[in-house]
Amino acid sequence: MLSSPIHTDLALPLSPDLAKRFGFMAADGLDPSQSGVSYIIVGWGGRSFYIETPTWSDLKPGPLFRALTLDRSVMHVGLAGAIDPAHPSVLAINLDGPAYERLLDLVLADFTGIETAGSGVVAGAQYGEYDLFYEADGWFNAAVGCNLWTARMLRQAELKTGWWTPLPGLLAASLRLHNPAGSFAYNPVAR
């Protein structure tokens, strides 16, 4: 799990199976099998805020209002190289095979329109050359936001979280509180 001050993403370690499952991205111009890719980064969020606010300096009243009220949702996917598990924004989580498969199935189920190349991608919405936005199931508001989505995905993978974790710090703390230390590839207590 990767965290920023207000958002969490899931970093999925690249394997041939994962590249195949996310192969729809290649048809949209972002090939997960390209050289140097170690992770596919996936997050869910409010369409307006997520797409129109890549940095805090881009914050505008309209997307903020929609995030606080109701907005359509999108999935954000990106490609990344190596990730340092000791970095303060990383919580490396150990999952067994069946738990990881449930997580992947649930993540992929939230994408809409990916069956046909180009049909689910949000046209013109990118932060850079290594990411894309896709249409997603569900509606977003700040009370039921991106970090609750991440918590729901992790609960599918048999991890326990707090019942309401709207901020990354709360989600990370609840994961540490409710799961044995062996659930983490890098001991978060030692930080």
Image (cartoon, rainbow, N blue to C red):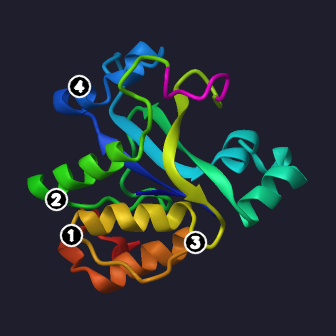
Q: Main secondary structure of the magenta part?
A: loop
Which callout, 4 or 3, points to the residue nearer the camera?
4
Give the percent coordinates (x, y) of residue 37.
Answer: 36, 26
Q: Secondary structure at mark 2?
A: helix
Is 122 in the magenta? Answer: yes
**Residue linked to disc 2:** 99
Label ID, residue 167: 3
The answer to whether mark 1 and mark 4 are in CB contact below 8 A is no
2 or 1: tag closer to the N-terminus: 2
Amino acid type for the residue under numbered disc 3 = Leu
Q: Is residue 78 left or right of residue 72?
A: left
The answer to whether mark 4 and mark 3 are in CB contact below 8 A is no
Q: Secondary structure at mark 4?
A: helix
Cα distance between the residues tagged 2 and 1: 6 Å
Give the percent coordinates (x, y) of residue 9.
Answer: 47, 52
1 or 3: tag closer to the N-terminus: 1
Instruction: Residue at 42% x, 17% y: name it.
Output: 117
Q: Is residue 32 visible?
A: no
Please give the range of residues in magenta.
Answer: 119-125
Quadrant position of residue 166: bottom right
**Residue linked to disc 4:** 20
Instruction: Residue at 50% x, 59% y: name it.
Output: 89
Q: Residues within 10 Å of mark 3 (few under 14, many from 20)?
A: some
Is 12 in the magenta? Answer: no
